[in-house]
């Protein structure tokens, strides 16, 4: 019986120490909730510290399919150039990652590792960017 109590005590102590270590190291991903409606994109926060970031993307549009693209650029979200095809010219920035064709009413997660800098989050389905599906995002050291 004493051995079982000692083992349980040791297990509890190890769990507490491991939890403290995770907190000290900033363990885990930072979560950013993204809500997309017909032609708007809202974020729970517009700035995070560098490291692993999980975007929890929800398409709350009635019927519109969207995509969620993360790009690294010094250009402000509203100033990206758009071609005659109503798409943002993707050669003007460094793509990080994306979720394509997110159906209305669906959700998805996108986890990326971001370094300090300026990012733009956008939907690059024809015409969506020009209708307001973009926002600036900052990653701090």
Image (tube, rainbow, N blue to C red):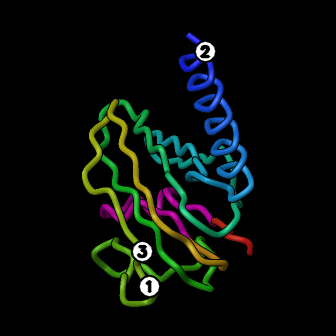
In the depicted structure, whether residue 55 falls above or below residue 83: above
Crowding around mark 1 (Cα neighbors within 10 Å: few <14, some 14 to 19, many 20+) is few
Task: Locate the N terminus and report the quarter of the image it occupies.
Answer: top right
Tell me the quarter of the picture where residue 12 sits.
top right
Q: Position of residue 75 (x, y in %)?
A: 61, 83
Residue matched to label 3: 96
Q: How far apart are the alpha carbons under marks 1 and 3? A: 6 Å
Residue 136: quadrant of the picture: bottom right
| Dot placed on the residue nearer the N-terminal end, 2 or 3 | 2
Q: Magenta: predominant secondary structure element? A: loop
Image quarter (top left, top right, bottom left or bottom right) of the C terminus: bottom right
Which of the two marks, 1 or 2, is nearer to us in this view? Answer: 2
Asked if labels 3 and 1 touch by Cβ distance under 8 angstroms, the answer is: yes
Callout 2 environment at 10 Å: few (<14), some (14 to 19), or many (20+)? few
Residue at (65, 50) in percent of width and height? 22
Residue interval drawn in magenta: 120-136
Return the residue at label 2.
2
Secondary structure at numbered mark 3: strand
Pointer 1: what residue?
A: 94
């Amino acid at each position: 019986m004493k051995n079982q109590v000692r083992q349980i005590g040791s297990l509890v102590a190890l769990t507490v120490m491991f939890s403290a270590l995770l907190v000290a190291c900033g363990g885990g991903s930072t979560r950013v909730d993204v809500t997309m409606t017909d032609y708007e994109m809202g974020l729970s926060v517009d700035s995070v510290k560098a490291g692993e970031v999980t975007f929890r993307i929800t398409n709350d549009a009635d019927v519109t399919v969207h995509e969620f693209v993360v790009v690294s650029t010094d250009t402000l979200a509203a100033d990206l150039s758009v071609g005659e095809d109503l798409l943002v010219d993707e050669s003007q920035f460094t793509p990080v990652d994306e979720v394509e064709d997110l159906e209305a009413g669906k959700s998805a997660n996108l986890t990326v590792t971001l370094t300090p800098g300026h990012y733009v989050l956008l939907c690059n389905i024809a015409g969506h960017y020009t209708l307001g599906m973009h926002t600036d995002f900052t990653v701090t050291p």
